[in-house]
Amino acid sequence: MMSLATDYPVPSSSTDDFAALLDTELDSTSDTSPEAQDDDDDDDNYDSDVDRIKRRKVEVVESIVDSRSSNLHEEPEKALDASLKNDLCTHPGIIGGLCIQCGQKVDAQSGVAFGYIHKDLRLGSGEIARLCDKDLKHLISRSKLYLVLDLDHTLLNSTRYLDITPEEEYLRSQTDPLQDSLKGSLFRLDGMHMMTKLRPFVQTFLKEASRLFDMYIYTMGERAYAMEMAKILDPENVYFNSKVIAKGDCTQRHQKGLDVVLAQESAVLILDDTEQVWVKHKENLILMERYHFFASSCRQFGFSCQSLSQLKSDESEADGALATVLKVLKRVHNRFFDKMLRSVRKEILSGCKVVFSRVFPTKFQAENHHLWKMAEQLGATCSTEIDPTVTHVISTDAGTEKSRWALKEKKFLVHPRWIEATNYLWQKQPEGNFPVTQTKNPHGHDHPLSNQNSEALRHTQP
Protein backbone atom coordinates (compact mmCIF):
# COMPACT_ATOMS: atom_id res chain seq x y z
CA MET A 1 0.00 0.00 0.00
CA MET A 2 1.40 3.37 -0.94
CA SER A 3 2.38 5.93 1.65
CA LEU A 4 0.94 9.33 0.89
CA ALA A 5 3.60 11.05 2.95
CA THR A 6 6.40 9.66 0.79
CA ASP A 7 4.79 9.22 -2.65
CA TYR A 8 2.77 12.41 -2.89
CA PRO A 9 2.03 14.26 -5.19
CA VAL A 10 1.50 11.56 -7.83
CA PRO A 11 -1.01 9.12 -6.32
CA SER A 12 -2.46 6.42 -8.54
CA SER A 13 -6.16 5.85 -9.06
CA SER A 14 -6.03 2.24 -7.91
CA THR A 15 -8.02 0.72 -5.07
CA ASP A 16 -4.83 0.27 -3.03
CA ASP A 17 -4.19 3.98 -3.42
CA PHE A 18 -7.69 4.75 -2.18
CA ALA A 19 -7.22 2.47 0.83
CA ALA A 20 -4.04 4.41 1.59
CA LEU A 21 -6.08 7.60 1.49
CA LEU A 22 -8.49 6.23 4.05
CA ASP A 23 -5.63 5.07 6.25
CA THR A 24 -4.36 8.64 6.25
CA GLU A 25 -7.74 10.36 6.50
CA LEU A 26 -9.25 8.26 9.25
CA ASP A 27 -6.17 6.98 11.05
CA SER A 28 -4.40 10.33 11.29
CA THR A 29 -5.65 10.39 14.89
CA SER A 30 -3.55 7.39 15.83
CA ASP A 31 -0.70 8.16 18.21
CA THR A 32 2.42 8.36 16.04
CA SER A 33 4.68 9.68 18.79
CA PRO A 34 7.55 7.53 20.01
CA GLU A 35 5.69 7.14 23.33
CA ALA A 36 2.55 5.67 21.76
CA GLN A 37 0.73 2.96 23.71
CA ASP A 38 -2.36 0.81 23.15
CA ASP A 39 -5.72 2.46 23.86
CA ASP A 40 -8.52 1.15 26.09
CA ASP A 41 -11.98 -0.22 25.25
CA ASP A 42 -13.27 3.15 23.98
CA ASP A 43 -10.43 3.26 21.49
CA ASP A 44 -11.26 -0.30 20.38
CA ASN A 45 -14.77 0.86 19.55
CA TYR A 46 -13.34 3.83 17.71
CA ASP A 47 -10.96 1.66 15.69
CA SER A 48 -13.68 -0.85 14.81
CA ASP A 49 -15.89 1.98 13.59
CA VAL A 50 -13.06 3.33 11.47
CA ASP A 51 -12.30 -0.14 10.07
CA ARG A 52 -15.96 -0.57 9.14
CA ILE A 53 -15.98 2.74 7.29
CA LYS A 54 -12.75 1.88 5.53
CA ARG A 55 -14.06 -1.48 4.29
CA ARG A 56 -17.29 0.10 3.07
CA LYS A 57 -15.56 2.89 1.18
CA VAL A 58 -12.98 0.58 -0.41
CA GLU A 59 -15.82 -1.67 -1.59
CA VAL A 60 -17.53 1.32 -3.18
CA VAL A 61 -14.39 2.42 -5.00
CA GLU A 62 -13.79 -1.12 -6.22
CA SER A 63 -17.26 -1.04 -7.73
CA ILE A 64 -16.44 2.31 -9.34
CA VAL A 65 -13.27 0.88 -10.87
CA ASP A 66 -15.19 -2.16 -12.12
CA SER A 67 -17.91 0.01 -13.64
CA ARG A 68 -15.35 2.12 -15.45
CA SER A 69 -13.86 -0.95 -17.10
CA SER A 70 -17.23 -2.20 -18.26
CA ASN A 71 -18.88 -1.10 -21.52
CA LEU A 72 -22.22 -2.66 -20.67
CA HIS A 73 -25.28 -0.39 -20.54
CA GLU A 74 -27.23 -0.31 -17.30
CA GLU A 75 -30.60 -1.94 -17.34
CA PRO A 76 -33.56 0.35 -16.49
CA GLU A 77 -33.99 -1.25 -13.07
CA LYS A 78 -30.31 -0.75 -12.22
CA ALA A 79 -30.44 2.83 -13.38
CA LEU A 80 -33.44 3.41 -11.13
CA ASP A 81 -31.67 1.82 -8.17
CA ALA A 82 -28.62 3.99 -8.80
CA SER A 83 -30.80 7.07 -8.98
CA LEU A 84 -32.51 6.26 -5.68
CA LYS A 85 -29.15 5.55 -4.08
CA ASN A 86 -27.84 8.88 -5.33
CA ASP A 87 -30.88 10.70 -3.94
CA LEU A 88 -30.42 9.13 -0.49
CA CYS A 89 -26.63 9.60 -0.26
CA THR A 90 -25.36 12.77 1.40
CA HIS A 91 -22.08 12.53 -0.59
CA PRO A 92 -19.74 12.90 2.40
CA GLY A 93 -16.62 12.91 0.25
CA ILE A 94 -15.64 13.22 -3.40
CA ILE A 95 -12.62 12.06 -5.37
CA GLY A 96 -12.29 12.98 -9.01
CA GLY A 97 -15.93 14.02 -9.17
CA LEU A 98 -17.23 10.71 -7.78
CA CYS A 99 -18.82 10.22 -4.35
CA ILE A 100 -16.67 7.94 -2.20
CA GLN A 101 -19.81 6.44 -0.63
CA CYS A 102 -22.30 5.83 -3.44
CA GLY A 103 -20.03 6.15 -6.45
CA GLN A 104 -22.24 8.65 -8.25
CA LYS A 105 -20.94 11.63 -10.20
CA VAL A 106 -21.06 14.82 -8.12
CA ASP A 107 -20.10 18.44 -8.67
CA ALA A 108 -16.31 18.30 -8.43
CA GLN A 109 -16.16 21.71 -6.76
CA SER A 110 -18.53 20.98 -3.89
CA GLY A 111 -17.17 20.68 -0.36
CA VAL A 112 -13.72 21.63 0.92
CA ALA A 113 -10.56 20.38 -0.79
CA PHE A 114 -8.19 18.23 1.26
CA GLY A 115 -5.51 17.72 -1.36
CA TYR A 116 -2.80 17.20 1.23
CA ILE A 117 -4.59 14.01 2.33
CA HIS A 118 -5.22 12.79 -1.20
CA LYS A 119 -5.23 14.37 -4.64
CA ASP A 120 -8.74 15.53 -5.68
CA LEU A 121 -10.28 14.68 -2.29
CA ARG A 122 -13.10 16.98 -1.18
CA LEU A 123 -15.20 16.59 1.97
CA GLY A 124 -18.66 17.92 2.72
CA SER A 125 -19.31 20.06 5.80
CA GLY A 126 -21.24 17.27 7.52
CA GLU A 127 -18.42 14.78 7.03
CA ILE A 128 -15.82 17.30 8.20
CA ALA A 129 -17.84 17.92 11.37
CA ARG A 130 -18.28 14.17 11.95
CA LEU A 131 -14.57 13.43 11.53
CA CYS A 132 -13.58 16.36 13.74
CA ASP A 133 -15.98 15.30 16.50
CA LYS A 134 -14.83 11.69 16.42
CA ASP A 135 -11.18 12.65 16.23
CA LEU A 136 -11.49 15.05 19.17
CA LYS A 137 -13.08 12.38 21.37
CA HIS A 138 -10.31 9.98 20.48
CA LEU A 139 -7.66 12.65 21.05
CA ILE A 140 -9.05 13.75 24.42
CA SER A 141 -9.03 10.14 25.59
CA ARG A 142 -5.24 10.29 25.09
CA SER A 143 -4.99 13.69 26.84
CA LYS A 144 -3.85 15.44 23.68
CA LEU A 145 -4.69 18.65 21.80
CA TYR A 146 -3.81 19.86 18.28
CA LEU A 147 -0.76 21.94 17.38
CA VAL A 148 -0.39 23.66 14.00
CA LEU A 149 3.22 24.62 13.21
CA ASP A 150 4.52 27.14 10.70
CA LEU A 151 7.86 26.34 9.05
CA ASP A 152 9.89 29.38 7.96
CA HIS A 153 11.18 31.62 10.76
CA THR A 154 9.35 29.42 13.30
CA LEU A 155 10.99 25.99 13.12
CA LEU A 156 13.74 26.73 10.59
CA ASN A 157 15.25 29.25 8.15
CA SER A 158 16.08 28.67 4.49
CA THR A 159 18.00 30.61 1.85
CA ARG A 160 18.82 30.18 -1.82
CA TYR A 161 22.43 29.54 -2.78
CA LEU A 162 22.49 32.70 -4.87
CA ASP A 163 21.49 34.80 -1.81
CA ILE A 164 24.40 33.65 0.36
CA THR A 165 26.69 36.58 1.25
CA PRO A 166 30.51 36.49 1.30
CA GLU A 167 30.38 36.41 5.12
CA GLU A 168 28.32 33.21 4.89
CA GLU A 169 30.56 31.35 2.45
CA TYR A 170 31.97 29.32 5.33
CA LEU A 171 28.63 27.50 5.40
CA ARG A 172 29.47 25.91 2.03
CA SER A 173 32.87 24.66 3.18
CA GLN A 174 32.99 21.12 4.49
CA THR A 175 36.34 21.80 6.15
CA ASP A 176 35.41 24.93 8.06
CA PRO A 177 35.87 24.41 11.83
CA LEU A 178 32.33 25.70 12.48
CA GLN A 179 30.82 22.83 10.49
CA ASP A 180 31.09 20.55 13.52
CA SER A 181 28.82 22.81 15.56
CA LEU A 182 26.33 22.96 12.68
CA LYS A 183 26.27 19.22 12.08
CA GLY A 184 22.73 17.86 12.15
CA SER A 185 21.14 21.30 11.88
CA LEU A 186 22.42 22.66 8.54
CA PHE A 187 21.21 20.98 5.35
CA ARG A 188 22.32 21.53 1.75
CA LEU A 189 19.49 20.86 -0.69
CA ASP A 190 21.31 20.81 -4.02
CA GLY A 191 18.24 19.71 -5.93
CA MET A 192 16.42 22.83 -4.77
CA HIS A 193 19.55 25.05 -4.86
CA MET A 194 19.05 26.10 -1.28
CA MET A 195 20.26 25.65 2.27
CA THR A 196 18.15 25.12 5.42
CA LYS A 197 19.10 25.69 9.05
CA LEU A 198 17.00 24.12 11.79
CA ARG A 199 16.23 26.31 14.78
CA PRO A 200 18.09 25.27 17.95
CA PHE A 201 16.11 22.91 20.21
CA VAL A 202 13.69 21.97 17.40
CA GLN A 203 14.16 18.20 17.67
CA THR A 204 13.67 18.21 21.44
CA PHE A 205 10.71 20.52 20.96
CA LEU A 206 9.01 18.16 18.49
CA LYS A 207 9.63 15.12 20.67
CA GLU A 208 8.21 16.79 23.79
CA ALA A 209 5.31 18.45 21.98
CA SER A 210 4.28 15.18 20.30
CA ARG A 211 3.45 13.75 23.74
CA LEU A 212 0.88 16.50 24.29
CA PHE A 213 -0.34 17.32 20.77
CA ASP A 214 -1.22 15.88 17.39
CA MET A 215 0.83 18.11 15.10
CA TYR A 216 0.32 19.63 11.66
CA ILE A 217 2.74 21.57 9.45
CA TYR A 218 1.07 24.57 7.80
CA THR A 219 3.14 26.76 5.48
CA MET A 220 2.60 29.35 2.79
CA GLY A 221 5.41 27.65 0.87
CA GLU A 222 4.91 25.31 -2.08
CA ARG A 223 4.14 21.65 -1.42
CA ALA A 224 7.45 20.33 -2.75
CA TYR A 225 9.31 22.59 -0.31
CA ALA A 226 6.96 21.73 2.57
CA MET A 227 7.44 18.00 2.05
CA GLU A 228 11.21 18.39 1.90
CA MET A 229 11.21 20.33 5.16
CA ALA A 230 8.95 17.70 6.75
CA LYS A 231 11.50 15.00 5.83
CA ILE A 232 14.27 17.00 7.48
CA LEU A 233 12.28 17.67 10.63
CA ASP A 234 10.67 14.24 10.83
CA PRO A 235 12.84 11.70 8.97
CA GLU A 236 11.15 8.74 10.68
CA ASN A 237 7.67 10.11 9.90
CA VAL A 238 6.51 9.81 13.53
CA TYR A 239 5.25 13.34 14.12
CA PHE A 240 3.36 14.57 11.05
CA ASN A 241 2.48 11.56 8.86
CA SER A 242 0.55 13.18 5.97
CA LYS A 243 -0.49 16.24 7.97
CA VAL A 244 1.47 18.74 5.88
CA ILE A 245 -0.57 21.68 4.56
CA ALA A 246 0.95 23.98 1.94
CA LYS A 247 0.03 27.12 0.01
CA GLY A 248 -2.06 25.26 -2.56
CA ASP A 249 -4.31 23.82 0.17
CA CYS A 250 -5.46 27.22 1.47
CA THR A 251 -9.07 28.15 0.68
CA GLN A 252 -8.41 31.91 0.82
CA ARG A 253 -5.62 33.80 -0.94
CA HIS A 254 -2.78 34.92 1.36
CA GLN A 255 -4.59 33.50 4.38
CA LYS A 256 -4.22 30.39 6.49
CA GLY A 257 -7.36 28.81 7.90
CA LEU A 258 -8.33 25.93 10.17
CA ASP A 259 -11.05 24.93 7.70
CA VAL A 260 -8.53 22.56 6.08
CA VAL A 261 -7.38 21.11 9.42
CA LEU A 262 -9.44 18.13 10.53
CA ALA A 263 -9.67 19.33 14.12
CA GLN A 264 -12.06 21.09 16.48
CA GLU A 265 -11.02 24.74 16.49
CA SER A 266 -11.43 25.03 20.28
CA ALA A 267 -8.70 22.41 20.80
CA VAL A 268 -6.13 23.89 18.37
CA LEU A 269 -3.03 25.93 19.17
CA ILE A 270 -1.05 27.65 16.40
CA LEU A 271 2.64 28.59 16.39
CA ASP A 272 3.49 31.13 13.67
CA ASP A 273 5.69 34.19 13.28
CA THR A 274 3.13 36.03 11.11
CA GLU A 275 -0.08 37.22 12.72
CA GLN A 276 -1.80 38.69 9.65
CA VAL A 277 -2.20 35.33 7.90
CA TRP A 278 -4.42 34.09 10.76
CA VAL A 279 -7.10 36.81 10.67
CA LYS A 280 -9.89 34.37 11.58
CA HIS A 281 -7.97 32.49 14.25
CA LYS A 282 -5.98 35.04 16.27
CA GLU A 283 -7.32 33.60 19.53
CA ASN A 284 -5.62 30.27 18.72
CA LEU A 285 -2.31 31.88 17.78
CA ILE A 286 0.89 32.02 19.83
CA LEU A 287 3.08 34.51 17.99
CA MET A 288 6.69 33.38 17.61
CA GLU A 289 9.82 35.50 17.52
CA ARG A 290 11.24 35.18 14.02
CA TYR A 291 14.35 33.09 13.47
CA HIS A 292 16.77 35.05 11.23
CA PHE A 293 19.75 32.78 10.71
CA PHE A 294 20.60 33.76 7.13
CA ALA A 295 21.33 37.27 5.87
CA SER A 296 18.62 36.97 3.21
CA SER A 297 16.05 36.56 6.00
CA CYS A 298 17.08 39.84 7.60
CA ARG A 299 16.93 41.61 4.24
CA GLN A 300 13.48 40.15 3.55
CA PHE A 301 12.08 41.91 6.61
CA GLY A 302 14.00 45.15 6.14
CA PHE A 303 16.62 44.67 8.86
CA SER A 304 20.02 46.21 8.22
CA CYS A 305 21.72 44.32 11.04
CA GLN A 306 23.90 41.27 10.57
CA SER A 307 22.27 37.85 10.71
CA LEU A 308 23.20 35.04 13.08
CA SER A 309 25.12 33.26 10.32
CA GLN A 310 27.14 36.41 9.56
CA LEU A 311 27.92 36.74 13.26
CA LYS A 312 28.78 33.03 13.37
CA SER A 313 26.36 32.68 16.27
CA ASP A 314 22.98 31.11 17.00
CA GLU A 315 20.05 31.07 19.41
CA SER A 316 20.47 29.42 22.78
CA GLU A 317 19.25 25.84 23.06
CA ALA A 318 18.16 26.26 26.67
CA ASP A 319 16.72 29.77 26.54
CA GLY A 320 15.78 30.17 22.88
CA ALA A 321 12.31 30.75 21.42
CA LEU A 322 11.34 27.08 21.07
CA ALA A 323 12.45 26.15 24.59
CA THR A 324 10.46 29.08 25.94
CA VAL A 325 7.29 28.38 23.96
CA LEU A 326 7.38 24.69 24.91
CA LYS A 327 6.92 25.74 28.54
CA VAL A 328 3.92 27.84 27.49
CA LEU A 329 2.40 24.94 25.55
CA LYS A 330 2.77 22.65 28.55
CA ARG A 331 1.00 25.17 30.79
CA VAL A 332 -1.85 25.63 28.33
CA HIS A 333 -2.21 21.87 27.93
CA ASN A 334 -2.32 21.32 31.70
CA ARG A 335 -4.86 24.08 32.26
CA PHE A 336 -7.09 22.79 29.46
CA PHE A 337 -7.29 19.32 30.96
CA ASP A 338 -7.49 20.59 34.54
CA LYS A 339 -10.50 22.68 33.52
CA MET A 340 -12.02 19.72 31.69
CA LEU A 341 -11.38 17.52 34.72
CA ARG A 342 -13.16 19.96 37.01
CA SER A 343 -16.04 20.23 34.56
CA VAL A 344 -16.51 16.46 34.35
CA ARG A 345 -16.25 16.08 38.14
CA LYS A 346 -18.92 18.74 38.73
CA GLU A 347 -21.41 16.81 36.61
CA ILE A 348 -21.32 13.73 38.88
CA LEU A 349 -23.60 15.03 41.66
CA SER A 350 -25.15 17.88 39.71
CA GLY A 351 -28.74 18.43 40.90
CA CYS A 352 -28.12 16.97 44.37
CA LYS A 353 -28.58 19.08 47.50
CA VAL A 354 -27.09 17.54 50.60
CA VAL A 355 -27.35 18.21 54.33
CA PHE A 356 -24.92 16.68 56.83
CA SER A 357 -26.11 15.38 60.19
CA ARG A 358 -23.76 14.31 62.98
CA VAL A 359 -20.83 14.04 60.57
CA PHE A 360 -18.70 16.99 61.62
CA PRO A 361 -17.25 17.53 65.12
CA THR A 362 -19.17 19.91 67.40
CA LYS A 363 -18.51 23.59 66.66
CA PHE A 364 -16.53 22.63 63.51
CA GLN A 365 -16.99 25.04 60.58
CA ALA A 366 -18.95 22.83 58.18
CA GLU A 367 -17.73 24.57 55.02
CA ASN A 368 -14.14 23.67 55.90
CA HIS A 369 -14.72 19.94 56.30
CA HIS A 370 -13.23 17.76 53.55
CA LEU A 371 -16.55 15.97 52.90
CA TRP A 372 -18.34 19.28 52.37
CA LYS A 373 -15.63 20.39 49.92
CA MET A 374 -15.65 16.98 48.22
CA ALA A 375 -19.43 17.14 47.68
CA GLU A 376 -19.14 20.62 46.15
CA GLN A 377 -16.31 19.49 43.84
CA LEU A 378 -18.64 16.73 42.64
CA GLY A 379 -21.29 19.31 41.78
CA ALA A 380 -23.59 18.98 44.79
CA THR A 381 -25.07 21.93 46.69
CA CYS A 382 -24.35 21.74 50.42
CA SER A 383 -26.56 23.20 53.15
CA THR A 384 -26.73 23.20 56.93
CA GLU A 385 -30.54 23.31 57.07
CA ILE A 386 -33.20 20.95 55.74
CA ASP A 387 -35.87 22.16 53.33
CA PRO A 388 -38.00 20.59 50.56
CA THR A 389 -35.22 21.03 47.98
CA VAL A 390 -32.81 18.76 49.90
CA THR A 391 -32.28 15.43 48.10
CA HIS A 392 -29.83 13.71 50.48
CA VAL A 393 -29.15 13.68 54.19
CA ILE A 394 -25.68 12.37 54.97
CA SER A 395 -25.34 11.01 58.46
CA THR A 396 -23.67 8.39 60.65
CA ASP A 397 -26.77 8.00 62.85
CA ALA A 398 -30.28 7.26 61.62
CA GLY A 399 -31.74 8.48 64.89
CA THR A 400 -30.93 12.17 64.47
CA GLU A 401 -33.69 14.67 63.80
CA LYS A 402 -32.50 15.32 60.23
CA SER A 403 -32.16 11.58 59.52
CA ARG A 404 -35.71 10.91 60.72
CA TRP A 405 -36.90 13.83 58.59
CA ALA A 406 -35.23 12.29 55.54
CA LEU A 407 -37.04 8.98 56.05
CA LYS A 408 -40.36 10.70 56.72
CA GLU A 409 -40.05 12.92 53.62
CA LYS A 410 -38.75 10.00 51.53
CA LYS A 411 -35.37 11.65 50.93
CA PHE A 412 -32.13 9.74 50.55
CA LEU A 413 -30.42 8.92 53.85
CA VAL A 414 -26.85 7.78 53.21
CA HIS A 415 -23.61 7.20 55.07
CA PRO A 416 -20.66 9.61 54.41
CA ARG A 417 -18.94 6.74 52.59
CA TRP A 418 -21.40 7.39 49.74
CA ILE A 419 -19.66 10.71 49.04
CA GLU A 420 -16.21 9.13 49.25
CA ALA A 421 -17.10 6.19 46.98
CA THR A 422 -18.65 8.54 44.42
CA ASN A 423 -15.51 10.66 44.46
CA TYR A 424 -13.14 7.71 44.04
CA LEU A 425 -15.18 6.02 41.31
CA TRP A 426 -16.11 9.22 39.41
CA GLN A 427 -19.72 8.03 39.23
CA LYS A 428 -22.75 8.54 41.45
CA GLN A 429 -23.11 5.40 43.56
CA PRO A 430 -26.41 3.62 44.41
CA GLU A 431 -27.68 5.13 47.66
CA GLY A 432 -29.05 1.79 48.84
CA ASN A 433 -25.51 0.47 49.12
CA PHE A 434 -24.72 2.94 51.92
CA PRO A 435 -27.35 2.49 54.67
CA VAL A 436 -27.16 4.40 57.94
CA THR A 437 -27.14 2.60 61.31
CA GLN A 438 -29.10 3.92 64.30
CA THR A 439 -26.75 4.33 67.24
CA LYS A 440 -28.99 2.57 69.80
CA ASN A 441 -32.54 1.29 69.61
CA PRO A 442 -34.79 0.83 72.69
CA HIS A 443 -33.41 -2.69 73.18
CA GLY A 444 -29.80 -1.48 73.24
CA HIS A 445 -28.72 -3.01 69.92
CA ASP A 446 -27.22 -1.40 66.84
CA HIS A 447 -29.09 -2.11 63.63
CA PRO A 448 -29.09 -0.76 60.09
CA LEU A 449 -32.22 0.90 58.83
CA SER A 450 -31.64 -0.58 55.42
CA ASN A 451 -35.21 -1.79 55.02
CA GLN A 452 -36.65 1.60 55.96
CA ASN A 453 -34.15 3.39 53.78
CA SER A 454 -34.83 1.07 50.87
CA GLU A 455 -38.54 1.79 51.21
CA ALA A 456 -37.77 5.50 51.07
CA LEU A 457 -35.58 5.00 48.04
CA ARG A 458 -38.33 3.23 46.16
CA HIS A 459 -40.51 6.30 46.49
CA THR A 460 -37.81 8.91 45.83
CA GLN A 461 -36.16 10.09 42.65
CA PRO A 462 -32.42 10.74 42.77
Image (cartoon, rainbow, N blue to C red):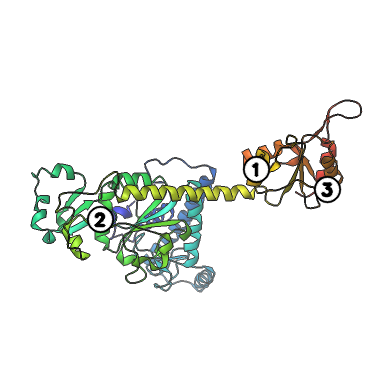
* Labelled pair 1, 2 in contact (Cβ < 8 Å): no
Query: Which residue: 29% across, 64% down?
Result: 220
Residue type for callout 1: Lys
Residue 93 is drawn in which quadrant?
Answer: bottom left
Q: Position of residue 351 (x, y in %)?
A: 70, 52
Identify the amino acid type marked 2.
Answer: Tyr
Q: Does the CB distance between marks 3 and 2 fall below 8 Å?
A: no
Q: Is 376 left, or right, of 50 in this rendering?
A: right
Residue ID for mark 1: 373
Q: Earlier in the sequence, mark 1 or mark 3?
A: 1
Label whose residue precedes the other's in the sequence (1 or 2): 2
Image position, residue 267 (x, y; %): 46, 56
Q: Is residue 452 above or below residue 202?
A: above
Check disc 3 and give the amino acid type.
His
Residue 82: image tag: none
**Percent from the top left, x then y, of residue 118?**
35, 60
Count residues near mark 1 (Cα–Cα under 10 Å), then give few for <14, some for 14-19, many for 20+. Answer: some
The x and y percentages for residue 150 are 32, 58
Q: Mark 2, residues whose alpha carbon is within 10 Å: few (<14), some, or many (≥20)?
A: many
Does dot 1 land on a helix, a strand or a loop?
Answer: helix
> From the viewer's perspective, is the residue at label 1 or at label 2 nearer?
1
Residue under numbered circle 2:
291
Measure how far apart labels 1 and 2 are at the Cα level. Answer: 49 Å
Mark 3 sits on what residue?
459
* Residue 385 left/right relative to 290: right
- Badge 3 density bin: few <14, some 14–19, many ≥20, Cα 10 Å: few
Q: Earlier in the sequence, mark 3 or mark 2?
A: 2
